[in-house]
Image: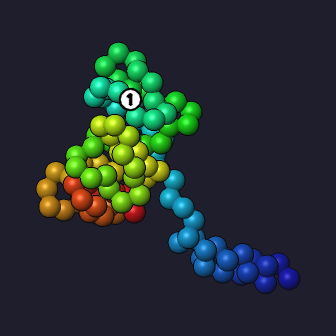
Amino acid sequence: MKIVASKFIAIICVTFMPFIGYTAEPPRPVKNLGSCPFGYHVSGNWCVPGSSARNAIERDGSCPFGFTSSGNYCIGDKDALRRGGSNCPVGWVVSGNYCVKR
């Protein structure tokens, strides 16, 4: 019985693991570009995330897929960075001027 239960749990984990949401790194402070993004507060030349903050990156044109505009920033639940060339690092995808972690 224990073997059957273990196999069942393993099958469930393998089946649903791809659907479990990716947890991004916790939001980091960003340079203050006028007004801070939603959920952040000013601390000197920085915008510091509060408890309800989402990840913020400097906006360069349109925000990447899954992000929304908040002043001079894009905010979202995934990790993203501005693209430095035509490609993104392994495990990241191109979205406009950005690379977004899968």
Q: What residue would you read off at disc 1?
A: 36
- What residue is drawn where x is 26% and y is 63%? 94
Q: Quadrant of the C terminus?
A: bottom left
- What residue is drawn where x is 34% and y is 63%? 91
Comparing 66 with 91, the one in front is: 66
Comparing 30 with 41, the one in front is: 41
Q: Which amino acid, mark 1?
A: Cys
Quadrant in the rendering for residue 88: bottom left
Q: Is residue 88 left or right of residue 78?
A: left
- Rendered position, 45 above or below 11: above
- What residue is drawn where x is 45% and y is 35%? 38
- What residue is drawn where x is 34% and y is 32%? 30
Residue 10 placement (x, y as % from top left):
67, 76
Please tell me whether mark 1 sits on a helix, a strand or a loop.
loop
Total numbered labels placed on residues in the image: 1
- Rendered position, 102 above or below 42: below
> Does any portion of residue 79 appear in the rendered image?
no
- Rendered position, 17 above or below 80: below
> Does any portion of residue 76 appear in the rendered image?
yes
Quadrant in the rendering for residue 11: bottom right
Residue 6 placement (x, y as % from top left):
75, 77
